Image (cartoon, rainbow, N blue to C red):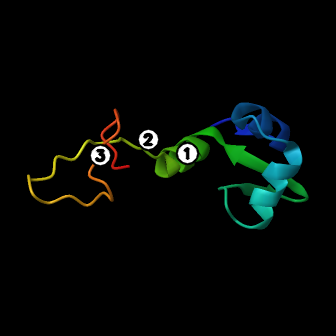
């Protein structure tokens, strides 16, 4: 059987407060197990939950516009490739 984590352990693992973990439980945001008055968490369920919420960072792309078409006001482009 897999070891179950407490709210304190989950809070430490995710670097949030225990009260935040309890809020997530209350709103059904995080997977949990209710044992009487206690709340416990499976580490594997938390790993799946985190992977599901993982997002890639934004990537900035320089877009080259064909000559003659200029969407910027004065036609100038800054060093990063953004219209000014």
Q: Residue at x 63, y 39 (%)?
A: 43
Mark 2 or 3: in front is 3
Instruction: Please report contact status of discs 2 and 3: CB closer than 8 Å, yes or no.
Output: no
How much space separates mark 2 and mark 3, taking CA atoms? Answer: 28 Å
For mark 1, give the secondary structure: helix
In the displayed structure, does residue 76 sit left or right of residue 50? left
Looking at the image, tell me whether mark 3 or mark 1 is earlier in sequence order.
Answer: 1
In the displayed structure, does residue 54 sit left or right of residue 28? left
Mark 3 or 1: in front is 3
For mark 3, give the secondary structure: loop
Q: Relative to 35, does residue 55 appear above or below in the rendering? A: above
Looking at the image, tell me whether mark 2 or mark 3 is earlier in sequence order.
Answer: 2
Q: Residue at x 31, y 54 (%)?
A: 74
Q: Which residue is mark 1?
A: 50
Q: Which residue is mark 2?
A: 57
In terms of image quadrants, where is residue 44? top right
Query: For the view shown, which residue lies furthest in the right direction?
Result: 37
In terms of image quadrants, where is residue 33? bottom right
Q: Which residue is mark 3?
A: 76
How much space separates mark 3 and mark 1, taking CA atoms? Answer: 43 Å
Instruction: Please report contact status of discs 2 and 1: CB closer than 8 Å, yes or no.
Output: no
């Amino acid at each position: 059987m897999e070891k179950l984590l407490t709210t304190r352990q989950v809070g430490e693992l995710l670097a949030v407060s225990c009260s935040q973990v309890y809020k997530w439980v209350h709103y059904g945001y995080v997977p949990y197990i209710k044992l009487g008055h206690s709340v416990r968490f499976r580490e594997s369920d938390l790993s799946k939950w985190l992977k599901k919420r993982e997002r890639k960072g934004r990537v900035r792309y320089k877009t080259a516009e064909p000559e003659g078409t200029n969407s910027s006001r004065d036609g100038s482009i800054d060093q990063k490739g953004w219209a000014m």
